[in-house]
Image (cartoon, coloured by chain):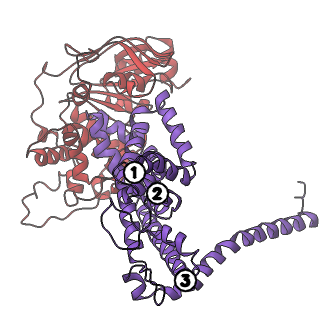
Amino acid sequence: MIRPDTQSKEPTVVSPPDSTQQGSTAREEAPDVSALGAPKPQGDGHNVVLEGLSAYYGKMHVIKDVNLTFPAGEVTAIIGPSGSGKSTVIRCINRMHEEIPGAHAAGAVKLDDLDVYDPQVDITSVRRLIGMVFQKPNPFPTMSIFDNVAAGMRLTGIRGENVRERVHKALRAVGLWGEVKNRLDQPGIGLSGGQQQRLCIARTIAVEPEVILMDEPCSALDPIATLKVEELIDELKARYTIVIVTHNMQQAARVADTTVFMLDGEVIEHAPTTELFTTPKDERTERYVTGKFG
Amino acid sequence: MTELPRISAGRRRKDRIMRGLLAAATGVALVPLVLVIYYLIYKGAGQWSGQFFTSDPNGNFLGYPGGIRSAILGTIEIVALATLISVPLGIAVALYLVEYGKKSLFANVVRYFVDVMTGVPSIVFGLFIYIVLVVAHVGGNFTAWKGSVAISLLMLPIVARSAEVVLNLVPGSLREAALALGAPRWRVVTRVVLPTAASGLVTGSLLAIARGAGETAPLLFTLGTANGLTFNLSQQMNTLPTQIFSDITSPRNAIVARAWGAALTLVVLVLILNLIARAAQRRSRLA
């Protein structure tokens, strides 16, 4: 039996009455994105635009001339069968694609006016602006919960005494604060799978990126943990441009404002989510969303 | 429904015979191992005494011939210097191969030569150092540090190879996570890869040290002969392997007996290193 009140599933941490951290214990589980600051005013976010993007593994041409716009303040989902190039597309956005030996990309990826593939651009600053959450939770095994969230700042050389503050903010934003505040010094790999994934999201937003890419972030999680991550995505979209790759069409329908359907490295259809699922224009999209192939 | 076939008597018999043969082969393989340990303890344990560990060989023709203090400390000094040379260098080679060189031609050539070096007989390293450092009179004649260099040449490929294996065990997803946060590669290596692999690197290095500590051949013509205790690595020095080597051919029974005592000591030292290596392995976060 799954009760909608998932709070009772979590170990309740009783804080001493004199604790200054007490706050609203009942609300502690819910993501508190307001901790990150007010949502950006309309038009202040950052759009990601792909212009004629092609990607290769060696000589294999896997992404063929993709043109897409991921608008600020929205969640865009990319769906498609295995091998259609969904993950490759988002790995091109933060230039992780080229980390694979023999892989390269051509065309342009623009973060507002900045071309991510400009040879003058420092690749590490690109990745700082465009965060990424991976399929399997991958906290650093040698680091504590606190250090895992602080890792982004320490690894990029951000210094200053506000590291602690930013870690706490990020943990509140992913709704993990109540669960871990009393064991911040314990290893991050001691958490459950769902908690680990939210820890990884906290690690990503602690660097304060502009865009968050998610590569099937829930495929290794159980339904309850998935629900929490989906709620979190909904909360985060006010501040970040979010692109999520998913195998799960229900998930795309739940979280995305617009959805892209990809097939064999090409964009087949890009439309508002409800439109794409209810009145697809392309016959292949219809066949995919109704489960006829893929 | 057909009946399941039964195991025939012939198959049962064959199985018993083959199992018996394998057990017998294992027994035969164990004989020399057990005999070596038995002989070491039988001949060597009697030599152990307070005096044995606290005195140096004295060269007296009569009476107590002296213990092995200088040999134990000499071995520790020489292996310590060899470790200081070979462990950082070996880990650096492995880091290059795993993090930077990867599948490039140069990396593959290096990998091949590291493998070849692992198989080079240890006496060849001794000979090499003898020619380029001893005969050439680089900083004196026979000196302890030249023995260390010879031992480090022997340890280097062992450290590099084991470190490469351990670094390859660090999941790629951790490197990706760190890179995706915007970390430069050198920080990914120092903050994520090395700490994750640390215990495995320690294990590999300790096994290389254990191997180096027991080698005689690289020391035979590099550090000369000495009896007295010295902490000066630019002098000749006594070590356990070289002392065993010279003692065992002595006509005096007391000195031959000292060789057995020293041999047992050496085996115990190596055993302790192996045990520490296993303990480090058990704490590893990698598979």
Residue labelled with disc 2: B208
Circle nearer the viewer, 1 or 3:
3
Kind of residue at badge 2? Ala
Which residue is depicted at the point 40% across and 45% down? A223
Give the number of callouts: 3
What's the residue at 90%, 68% (across, down)? B13
Do callouts 1 and 2 mark residues in contact (Cβ within 8 Å)? Answer: yes
- Image quarter in which the N terminus of chain B is found: bottom right
Subunit under mark 3: B
How packed mark 2 is, by other alpha carbons closer than 10 Å (few <14, some 14-19, many 20 or more), is many
Residue type highlighted by circle 1: Ser
Q: CA distance from mark 3 to mark 2?
A: 29 Å
**Which of A219 and B246 lies nearest the eye of the viewer?**
B246
Q: What residue sits 47% from the left and 66% below the top?
A: B274
Residue B282: name its quadrant.
bottom left
Position of residue B24 in the picture relative to residue A182 (left or right): right
Residue B162 placement (x, y as % from top left): 47, 50
**Chain ID for label 2?**
B
Residue at image mark 1: B86
3 or 2: mark nearer the eye: 3
**Please, what secondary structure does the residue beneath circle 3 have?**
helix
Q: Colour of chain A?
A: red
Label 1 marks a residue whose chain is: B
Q: Secondary structure at mark 1?
A: helix
Residue designated by label 3: B257
Residue B284, horizontal then vertical, whole percent: 41, 58
Give the alpha-carbon distance from disc 1 to disc 3, as whole Å.
34 Å
Q: Nearer the viewer, residue A219 or B248?
A: B248
- Residue A226, image quadrant: top left
Colour in which chain B is shown?
A: purple
